[in-house]
Image (cartoon, rainbow, N blue to C red):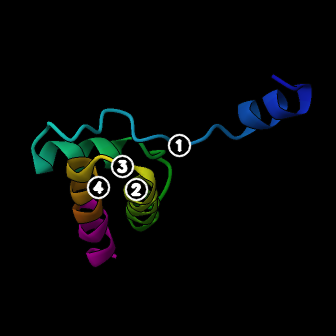
Amino acid sequence: MAKWFRKAVTARPPNTLGGWSKSKSADARRRAALSSRPKSWSLQRRRRSAGRALQALANVTKDKPTRLKAKADARYFFRRL
């Protein structure tokens, strides 16, 4: 890993969808996506960030069930902004 990249990643780590899985129930998936955002952020910012991450996942995956569930979860978060 390049030195500049390591410094940038440690200064501002990327947010992942830790714990999100297509095999979980909708409530569990959404809870995992929301809890993967920093707790210091406002609820609105956490919902927007989780929605964007799920929309990005839906855009790049080739697995149809994953795409449908990620898109549905993203819409859920965007509706609650």
Badge 3: how crowded within 10 Å, few (<14), some, or many (20+)?
A: few
- Looking at the figure, which quarter contains the N terminus? top right
How many angstroms separate mark 2 from mark 4 (CA)? 15 Å
Disc assigned to residue 15: 1
**Label 3 sits on what residue type?**
Lys
- Looking at the figure, which quarter contains the C terminus? bottom left
- In the picture as drawn, the residue positioned furthest to the left comes out as 25
Query: Viewer-nearest of labels 2 and 4?
Result: 4
The residue pinned by badge 2 equals 50
Query: Is residue 62 highlighted in magenta?
Result: no
How many angstroms separate mark 1 from mark 3 (CA)? 22 Å
Q: Earlier in the sequence, mark 3 or mark 2?
A: 2
Could you tell me residue 3's position as x and y percent? 90, 25
**Label 1 sits on what residue type?**
Asn
Q: Residue at x 45, y 62 (%)?
A: 52
Q: Residue at x 25, y 37 (%)?
A: 21
Looking at the image, how many numbered discs can be counted on the residues?
4
Q: Is residue 30 left or right of residue 10?
A: left
